[in-house]
Image (cartoon, rainbow, N blue to C red):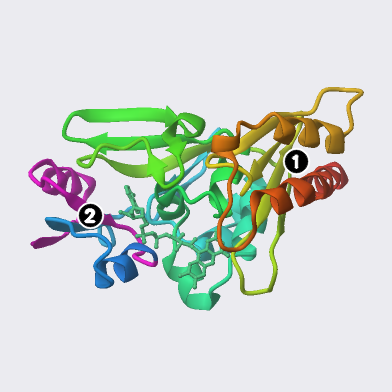
Amino acid sequence: MSTTFARSVDEVVAALATSPKPLVVGGGTLCIPALVRGEIVPTDIVDLGRAGLDTIVDGPAIELGALVSYQQLITSPVVRRGLPLLHRLASGITGGLQIRHQGTLVGALCAARPQSDVPAAVVALQAEVLVRSAWGARTVPVERFLVGPMTPHLAPQEFVVGVRIPKSPERTGYVKHKFAESSWPVVTAAAVPGRVVLGGVAGTPQVVPLPAGVTVRTAVADHLASLPPGERWTDLRAPWEYRRRVAPEIAVRAVEQAEEAR
Ligand SMILES: Cc1cc2nc3c(=O)[nH]c(=O)nc-3n(C[C@H](O)[C@H](O)[C@H](O)COP(=O)(O)OP(=O)(O)OC[C@H]3O[C@@H](n4cnc5c(N)ncnc54)[C@H](O)[C@@H]3O)c2cc1C
């Protein structure tokens, strides 16, 4: 097994192109423990840590490099002004300083865990995922990138260079329900004008449109009632039935927060 500490995007591309089963390491907070436990057995390791991907670029949209940590999202004035929802999300990530400094938004996105804070929030913000490989570059809307639980739309020789997120400075809200200060979320709700996106209720984030004249509670309850049984999410924290019952209230709080942020 080879290990490449890539010093540029081109070096990442080259290392991935020749590897049958590579492991891309971002901050390593999820994949290194899994590697140590023997749950993943790659042919090669490609570490992004020195590839210069920890940049936040301001423009009509904000581009976050693959190595941008939660701590950078918390401290960046660009993110605080242009993407307050992400600032709020990052401030609520548990695991202490180490996870905040090492864990990345893009790593969480690529892990595609339904119980994570990140997927539903970036779907609400209509992020685009910037993918690179020896075949070239492609840009994927995040809803299409999240194919299923723990399943990103990525070939083994592809990697994510970063995400591009339209600025969304006003009227956004983010609320999560968890059982203890230190626990992962059970249900999350990210509110933007006209819709709320739920995490933790299905294998992929659920976009619930909020038409005029329908209450948030009703819109969410109806959406969840129509969710096919095979898509309902259950894990060790809570069964789907519990998630179904709390989600409307979490969504209401997120929408209220968005309205207060006007
Ligand atoms: C103690 C602890 C507490 C936590 N608390 C929370 C919490 O409150 N809420 C929450 O949502 N999450 C929580 N997490 C999860 C945390 O969000 C993730 O561990 C972190 O964001 C993953 O980022 P990373 O860069 O370390 O990913 P890595 O571990 O490096 O990678 C994760 C996966 O994504 C792949 N990957 C990473 N980067 C790329 C890339 N650029 N291109 C292609 N594939 C890539 C890797 O191959 C791997 O499969 C917690 C984790 C820990 C350990």
Find residue 92 and report its horizontal and vertical position in percent: 64, 64
Q: Nearer the viewer, mark 1 or mark 2?
A: 2
**What residue lies at 48% left-to-right and 53% top-to-bottom?**
105
Side of 196 where 166 appears, left or right: left
In this view, the residue in front, 118 or 198, is 198
Side of 188 where 56 appears, left or right: left
**What residue lies at 25% left-to-right and 60% top-to-bottom?**
40
Side of 240 where 231 appears, left or right: left
Q: Which residues are magenta?
A: 1-29
How crowded pointer 2 is (Cα within 10 Å; few <14, some 14-19, many 20+) is rated as many
What is the three-letter code of the residue carrying label 1? Glu
105 up-or-down from 63: above or below? below
Q: How many marks?
A: 2
Q: Quadrant of ligand 1?
A: bottom left
Q: Is residue 18 magenta?
A: yes
- Asked if labels 2 and 1 touch by Cβ distance under 8 angstroms, the answer is no
What is the three-letter code of the residue carrying label 2? Leu
Beta carbon of the mark 1 residue lies under 8 A of ligand 1:
no
In this view, the residue in front, 103 or 246, is 246
**Mark 1 vs 2, N-terminal side:** 2
How crowded pointer 1 is (Cα within 10 Å; few <14, some 14-19, many 20+) is rated as some
Q: Which residue is mark 1?
A: 170
Identify the disc placed on residue 212. none
Q: Secondary structure at mark 1?
A: loop
Beta carbon of the mark 2 residue lies under 8 A of ligand 1:
yes
Q: Quadrant of residue 195?
A: top right
**What residue lies at 13% left-to-right and 57% top-to-bottom?**
44
Q: Quadrant of residue 77?
A: bottom right
- The quarter of the picture where the N terminus appears is bottom left
Q: Which residue is mark 2?
A: 23
> Alpha carbon of mark 1 to alpha carbon of mark 2: how far?
38 Å
135 up-or-down from 38: above or below? above
